[in-house]
Amino acid sequence: LQSIRDDIALIKMIRTATLDDPISRLGPETLERIRNPRCHPLPPLSPTLDLAITTYLALEHSSRRSYEDIRRALQRTLKCELPSFHSIEKSIAELTGVEAIENDMCWDSCMGFTGPDANLQACSRCHKPRYDQDILNRTGGKIRKSRKFYTYPLATQLQAAFGDWDNAKDLGYRVERTHELLDRLFNNKTQIPSFEDYIDGTDYLEGVLDAKIQDNDIVVMSSMDAAQLIDSQQSDVTIYVWIILDYSPDKRYKKKRVLIGGVIPGPNKPSNLESFLFPGFHHVSALQREGLQIWNAYQNRKYLSRVHHLFPLADAQGLIYYNGMCGYCGKNGCRLYCGILGRRKATGTRYYPAMLRPQGHYHVQGCDHDDIPLASIPQPACADYSVNLEHLVSSASVTEYERRRKETGIVKPPILLGLQSTHTLPIPRCMTIDMMHELGNLFSLLVSLWRGELASFGDRPELWDFGVLFDLDVFKAHGQDVADCGRHLSAEHERKPRDLYEKRNSQYKSIEWETYGLGYAVALLYEVLPEKYWRHLCKLVRALRLLCQYRISREDLEEADRLLSSWVMEFEELYYERREDRLHFVRHIIHQLTHYASEVYAKGPPIIYAQWTMERTIGNLGREIRQPSHIYENLSREGLRRCQVNALKALIPELDPSETPPPPRVCEDLGDGFMLLHTKSRYDTIPQGVFYDAIDKYLGEGLSPRRCHRWARLKLPNGQVARSAWRERLRVQEATRISRNVKFLDGTKTRIGEVDHYTHLAYSTTDEQGNRIIHRDGVAIIRPYSDPDSDLLGLSYGGFVTCTLLPESEIFAINVKQITSIVAMIPHHPTIPSTNEEEERFFMFEKPGFDVTRFVDNDDFIDDEAEDEESGNAP
């Protein structure tokens, strides 16, 4: 088939790529820089150039005119001649070596004129001419105006990342961590106790042990996603990025370290996306074959590095370009290619991965196989994929191709086959689960079921015992409950979910679905869903919370695996009920859950390779567009600017204020990453009432509370900022995101409390030898919550933590260093099983990604990963 031949031709061009290929479109200066990088730090900038670049960076979100106005003002008042805007951009390009590769594209975004199609004079899809015919005719063929798209070469961006001492040291994380892990495994002969990064996964470790990944190599993963830039009109754009996995997890996902790979303009979706991806993957393949010369500023040496592509990240629609599979509608539609075959309705064409065979007279050919036990679900099979792909491409006719496509679940040879096999994981082993999109799809599916929206002809949703939101008034009230919970989430929880009734059909965001499902649903649907369905939901939420952690212990992983395996089978029994007319309930996300635990063993925590980084990149790039009339051209220029600025900041960290942010105006550093922050009371006073008693008990016998200041906020080592009731209660309640509830350690027990205020105590004690010891303690005055209701905690598999706020007489003081994180405590009025009475309580929701609280004694201090920035709703 011609389409298969075109795909194979493109793959061969990538596989045999070299940097010298004319089709790579790299200029001689760029080639020279790639092969012979500068082997010393950048020389100091001249004062004039330093001022110009600093001004340029400070005006990142302003227009070119703003820079020129400042330039003219400095020239007039201080006689300082700064370079023009164009000159400063040219200087930054010269300093970093980062340039864009331009290629022609179809005017309607169908394809790019690259690879085997580089010499076409018209689009092979819509047949529009490549060049503007009016201009071509007026100039007698001298001027060939075409539409362009940009690719940003990875090589020069990687070289810039290693060009500074501190940054190059940070890039040593992967090698250092790998050696530590292997030494521990070989010396102690033990299993990996917990999974914190991809380094703990077997996919990476096998590559290291097989010597495919060397210490000098650079490991990256690609991430691709599409977005609509303007809500009110068709404005699709696709962006892909490179994430450097040599950084530690707390550094690699930051804006300045995410490398833009390319921008694929809209407004239409590409018909041949591979032609747009070709320049970037051709370039990476060339670096894998030839190697990339790196000067490592930390090691002060030059060496040859290979770029190892570990994982390609994309949603279900984008993944088909990476793996060549049929997607979630096909008979063999698992994104990990486990081989489980779907079932379709007798009158339908779409397949669903139901484990249980429909009951009754179900005899759809190829779909009427027996029940599939969970234990028999295989792992991704690379050998099967290769054999099936070879079987597909050998098709002699369209009819044969269609039959084999249906059998194998493979549509075409994917672009990833062009990368060097020694420097990338094979398909489908390199494929990952997509927790960000999949959780959104999962909870959207469940809400649709509870709403009774998926009924087939003859199936009456008003009779469904799980259709608890079918009544419009009930759903409207539920949606308002969701919105009302929002103010109880701190700013650390990012976007709060909107009213589910009003906003669900208007692009409800993935983060909103995640917060709703993992945070609210269990509490808001208690006593709404019948108990068997509610406990079923609790099982899912508990498992997903465990898998959303940055650090997943082996015990947590085994528990999550048991819960999800049980949940998937119960879902089919409770909702699908072996009914052919309900086969469409069993979406592919239900099947994907059976792979979640095994993928942690192979690739590490799912949050490490979730699509949140891509989501943020699209968002912050889109916000920088200042001329909507030329939205795609501006987005492409912003992509280039981002690459150049990030490279410049990597080479000269002094230009990046976020590297060394000034300390807050009013603060008190307590050490170990804890800091008291403004507001500070104007006068120091002696504590009164229960606060006096709390501090008196904290100080112990022989010491009495003295005059001290109140503090409003506390910065934690994980980057969160905890606030206090003292100041939050003075604010407008509707506008306040409550951030005063914290999780802390009381001995070895995890507890929750509301902070009234913080203070700083200075006092002295005498040791056994009679020496005087000076203490300077940061102290939090805590009003504790009760222990969670044990009955509801047990019924919900540990997923429903509901507490009462104890009276003020229970207030006590703790050292602020006992606080581990902020949590949300959201009011509700459940009926407690032990008393069968309704109580005023609060249910806990902890931001996904932090270690899940266990309300039992433990000896392990909770070690949360740092967030990027301090929250910004301070008084």
Image (spheres, grey):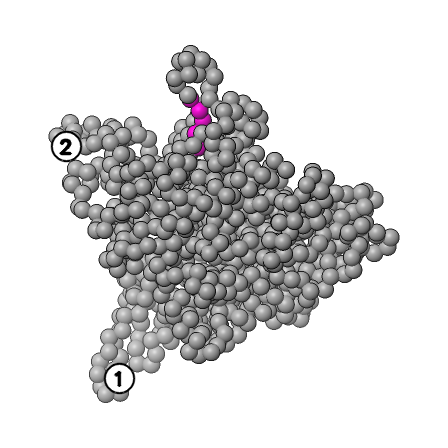
**Residue type highlighted by circle 1:** Asp
Q: Which of the pair 78/314 is nearer the observer?
A: 314
Tag 1: Cα neighbours inside 10 Å, few (<14), some, or many (≥20)? few
Task: State whether residue 9 is above or below residue 417.
Answer: above
- Residue 370 location (% of width, % of height): 78, 60
- Secondary structure that dominates the magenta span: strand
Residue drawn at (37%, 57%), measured in percent from left and top?
Answer: 217
- Residue 114 location (% of width, % of height): 47, 34
Could you tell me how far apart the alpha carbons at marks 2 and 1 are, in whole angstroms? 64 Å
Q: Which of the pair 757/411 is nearer the observer?
A: 411
- Residue 821 location (% of width, % of height): 44, 62
The residue that disc 1 covers is: 767
Residue drawn at (48%, 36%), measured in percent from left and top?
Answer: 115
Looking at the rendered structure, the secondary structure element under dot 2 is: loop
Specify whether residue 773 is in view.
yes
Residue 454 appears in which quarter of the rendering? top right
Marker disc for residue 80: 2
Task: State whether residue 528 is above or below residue 461.
Answer: below
Extent of the magenta region = 145-149
Residue 148 forms part of the magenta stretch: yes
